[in-house]
């Protein structure tokens, strides 16, 4: 394994002098990596020391004009990018119907109007077509796409970027699942004016570690003032250090090749992202998941049709070999296909237990967590299959006490 190059924040934390008697936050009062802003530790809100050096290095690695470290996940980056758009005078943003919750919540919080771009679901959320993207962009001042998505698929990046350029509108990419792609042709930074990388998902960074980027001076200025309004004022130093470390962690091409071979051997989805192995188990999903857990193997999620295995450069080759051995002979079941949207009725809504919701029209989108993209959209008729998947899931969003919101006239 190649050595990780110099990490400014980590070195600063390692060089701390002892004794260190804390009359400052955090309240645990232990010297160590979890410190606050001290004379030697710089300040994320106005960096001029080790954090500034780390951000410069990460911008260089990612090919960006500016990089901003985040300790509050890609969610903070999505919000900062949306705020930057608003500060640039944009009030309508087009995004795919299966965009992550953070995009929809961000628009809601900032009073931005969302233009939903329809996308197929066969049987999991897909990227919208170029024609649908163009129709959405025609109605909006900016385009926000997810690249790649949780299932390892990419939107038509080159064509979408060309459309945006033609219409003089910015392209923003939610790369919550694409931090590992820097330096490759599919990296968000090759196409977008602003993008966020969820370093904690696909690089060896701590949970919530992320970075948001601007590709040119105009958006760097907008994003710079937006990001300070969206981040915590108490950033975690271990997370900051881990993000810098993650971008300097060496790429492992032999692992990437092994992942591609494993996908083929397992009959996984033929996606373009080596870090996401999406295996169709259909109705056998729960049994397969339980079997793997008995062997100490935990997938990222079970969406009721697919088990998704999330890799990163820190995945070990022997773990891929074990996965192959365990999965190879497991039975596969039928996939279930959700119904298409029935149109959005108006009227009063009320929550009903999942069992009673089958056949009714959903009034607020909800789904499994993860992946936190909607399983049932507002206006969609709730099928027995979708209700069963929600009922069986360990974690969901959009439900309240196990109840789902439906339109009353339909109830
Ligand atoms: C596509 C997408 N965007 C944004 C986010 C938000 O990222 P975070 O959880 O790091 O805030 C997620 C999280 O799963 C995601 O899947």
Image (cartoon, rainbow, N blue to C red):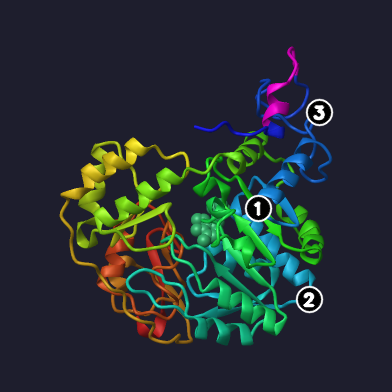
Q: Which residue is labeled 3 in the image?
A: 40
Distance (Cα) linking label 3 and label 2: 39 Å
Secondary element under disc 3, as helix, strand or loop, is: loop
Which label sits on residue 196?
A: none
Q: Nearer the viewer, mark 1 or mark 3?
A: 1
Q: How far from the left and from the top, in percent, is residue 302?
A: 33, 55
Secondary element under disc 2, as helix, strand or loop, is: loop
User: N-terminal of the two: label 1 or label 3?
Assistant: 3
Quadrant into which the C terminus falls: bottom left
Q: How far from the left and from the top, in percent, is residue 116?
A: 54, 79
Q: Residue at x 65, y 79 (%)?
A: 164
Which label sits on residue 89?
A: 2
Crowd band around label 2 with a 10 angstrom C-alpha radius: few (<14), some (14–19), many (20+): few
Which label sits on residue 62?
A: 1
- Residue 110: quadrant of the picture: bottom right
User: N-terminal of the two: label 3 or label 2?
Assistant: 3
Distance (Cα) linking label 2 and label 1: 27 Å
Q: Is residue 141 visible?
A: no
Q: Nearer the viewer, mark 2 or mark 1?
A: 1
Secondary element under disc 1, as helix, strand or loop, is: helix
Say whether marks 3 and 2 touch (CB < 8 Å): no
Q: Which residues are magenta?
A: 10-21
Crowd band around label 1 with a 10 angstrom C-alpha radius: few (<14), some (14–19), many (20+): many
Q: How far from the left and from the top, in percent, is residue 291?
A: 21, 44
User: N-terminal of the two: label 2 or label 1?
Assistant: 1
Q: Is residue 331 magenta?
A: no
Q: Nearer the viewer, residue 98 or 219?
A: 219
Q: Seen in the image, is 326 located left or right of residue 59?
A: left
Q: Seen in the image, is 93 located left or right of residue 387?
A: right
For residue 253, above or below residue 188: above
Q: Is residue 14 magenta?
A: yes
């Amino acid at each position: 394994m190649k050595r990780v190059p110099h990490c400014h924040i980590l070195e600063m934390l390692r060089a701390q002098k002892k004794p260190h008697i804390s009359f400052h936050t955090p309240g645990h009062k232990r010297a160590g990596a979890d410190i606050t802003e001290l004379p030697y530790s710089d300040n994320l809100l106005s960096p001029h020391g080790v954090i500034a050096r780390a951000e410069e290095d990460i911008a260089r690695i990612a090919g960006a004009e500016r990089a901003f470290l985040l300790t509050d996940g890609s969610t903070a980056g999505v919000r900062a990018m949306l705020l930057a758009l608003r500060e640039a005078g944009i009030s309508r943003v087009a995004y795919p119907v299966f965009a992550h919750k953070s995009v929809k919540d961000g628009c809601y919080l900032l009073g931005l109007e969302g233009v939903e771009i329809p996308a197929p679901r066969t049987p999991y959320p897909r990227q919208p077509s170029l024609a649908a993207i163009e129709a959405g962009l025609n109605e909006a001042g900016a385009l926000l796409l997810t690249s790649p998505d949780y299932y390892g698929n990419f939107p038509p990046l080159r064509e979408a970027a060309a459309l945006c350029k033609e219409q003089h509108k910015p392209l923003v990419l939610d790369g919550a699942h694409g931090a590992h792609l820097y330096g490759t042709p599919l990296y968000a930074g090759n196409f977008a004016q602003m993008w966020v990388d969820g370093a904690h998902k696909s690089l060896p960074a701590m949970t919530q570690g992320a970075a948001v980027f601007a590709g040119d001076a105009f958006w760097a200025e907008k994003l710079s003032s937006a990001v300070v309004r969206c981040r915590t004022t108490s950033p975690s130093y271990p997370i900051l250090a881990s993000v810098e470390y993650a971008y300097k962690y060496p790429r492992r091409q032999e692992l990437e090749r092994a992942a591609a071979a494993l996908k083929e051997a397992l009959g996984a989805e033929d996606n373009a992202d080596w870090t996401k192995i999406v295996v169709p188990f259909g109705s056998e999903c729960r049994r397969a998941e339980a079997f793997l857990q008995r062997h100490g193997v935990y997938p990222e999620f079970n969406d009721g049709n697919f088990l998704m295995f999330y890799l990163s450069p820190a995945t070990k080759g022997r773990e891929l070999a074990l996965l192959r051995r365990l999965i190879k002979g497991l039975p596969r079941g039928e996939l279930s296909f959700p119904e298409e949207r029935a149109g959005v009725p108006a009227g009063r809504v009320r929550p009903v237990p999942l069992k009673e919701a089958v056949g009714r029209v959903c009034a607020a989108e909800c789904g499994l967590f993860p992946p936190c993209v909607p399983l049932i959209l507002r206006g969609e008729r709730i099928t027995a299959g979708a209700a069963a998947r929600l009922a069986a899931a360990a974690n969901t969003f959009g439900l309240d006490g196990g109840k789902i919101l439906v339109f009353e006239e339909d109830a």
